[in-house]
Amino acid sequence: MAKAAAKKPPTKTEVYASISESTGVAKKDVGLVFDALVDEIAKALSKKGSQAFTLPGLCKIVVQHKP
């Protein structure tokens, strides 16, 4: 028997559209929020930052240096 195809993860456009529909915020504004979030994560994970970033209730990103 053939296995069922795995579901593909949502695209960036689909995520933005879904958030826009559920919050009533324009897709363009959702994109701006994500862009700002990416900038904040990059600052936190940089060598000058804390090298850790937490989105409460969602995820924690920590830089680890492995040989």
Image (spheres, rainbow, N blue to C red):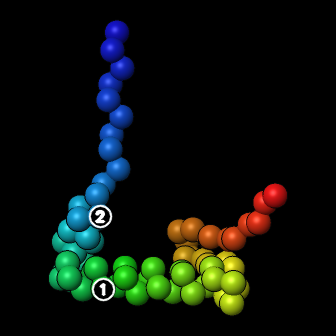
Give the residue drawn at x 30%, y 85%.
32
Extreme residue in the top direction: 1
Tag 1: residue type? Leu
Q: Quadrant of the N terminus?
A: top left
Q: Quadrant of the C terminus?
A: bottom right
Residue 57: image quadrant is bottom right
List x then y, in percent, for residue 59. Answer: 57, 68
Give the residue drawn at x 35%, y 50%.
9
Asked if residue 18 can be seen in this view, the reply is no
- The residue that disc 2 covers is 12
Between 46 and 5, the one nearer to me in the picture: 46
Q: Can you tell which mark lies on residue 24?
A: none
Extreme residue in the front direction: 67
Tag 2: residue type? Lys
List x then y, in percent, for residue 19. Answer: 27, 71
Give the residue drawn at x 20%, y 68%.
17
Q: CA distance from mark 1 to mark 2?
A: 13 Å
Vertical placement of residue 1 versus 33, above or below: above
- The residue that disc 1 covers is 32
Q: Secondary structure at mark 1?
A: helix
Kindly check if marks 1 and 2 are in contact, taking CB atoms under 8 A apart as contact.
no
List x then y, in percent, for residue 35. Answer: 37, 82
Of the image marks 1 and 2, the number of the one nearer the N terminus: 2
